[in-house]
Amino acid sequence: MSEAQTIDDEAGIARDLTAFQQNILVILSEEPMYGLAIKRNLESYYGTEVNHGRLYPNLDDLVEMDLVEKSELDKRTNQYELTEEGHDAVLDRLNWMLSKFVTDETRGEEVRDLVDTRL
């Protein structure tokens, strides 16, 4: 595995992902994408180039963990899509982050405002 070790516990798998892998899952939460589109989204987020040698091994790891499904669009292009397990991994991460961040009503309101502006 390139950046994460796999373990048997499904929740443990999601919790052992690197930030880079978690970011890939979040990007794929929007819609299925081909590799170059994922790369562009990551580069926009990081503000720097993302090397193919980092992206594709991590995508392969996420496929092996059943968090992402890989399908062939054409002979040269693969599409990646979040699986139900991948969706659950994103929700698990958000739930954990919110449980740490929302410590009072003010912070709860900040999160509600963020969600409201996205809807």
Image: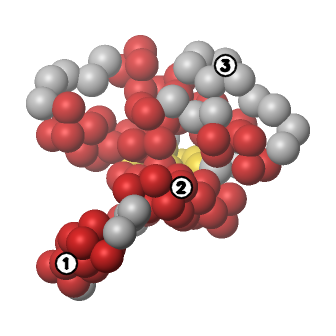
Where, quadrant-wise, is the C terminus in this rendering? bottom left
Q: The residue tagged with tag 1: helix, strand or loop?
A: helix
Q: Residues within 10 Å of mark 3 (few under 14, many from 20)?
A: few
Question: For the point 74% across and 42% down, which residue is it?
Answer: 12
Looking at the image, do the residues carrying marks 3 and 1 touch, with CB atoms under 8 Å apart?
Answer: no
Per the image, the residue denoted by label 2 is 96
Mark 3 vs 1, N-terminal side: 3
The structure residue drawn at horizontal position 71% and vertical position 40%, both measured from the top left corner, is 13
Q: Tell me the residue that label 1 is attached to.
A: 113
Dot 3 amino acid type: Met
Closer to viewer: mark 3 or mark 2: 2
Q: Nearer the viewer, residue 24 or 98?
A: 98
Q: What amino acid type should be assigned to the residue bearing mark 1?
A: Asp
Task: Name the residue rendered at 67%, 19% in the picture.
Answer: 1
Q: Is residue 33 visible?
A: no
Distance of mark 3 from mark 1, alpha carbons? 39 Å
Is the residue marked by circle 2 packed among few (<14), some (14-19), or many (20+) residues within 10 Å? few
According to the picture, the residue beneath numbered tag 3 turns out to be 1
Q: Quadrant of residue 4?
A: top right
Q: Is residue 98 left or right of residue 60?
A: left
Mark positioned earlier in the residue sequence (1 or 2)? 2
In terms of secondary structure, where does tag 2 sit? Answer: helix
In-image side of 95 versus 38 (left or right): right
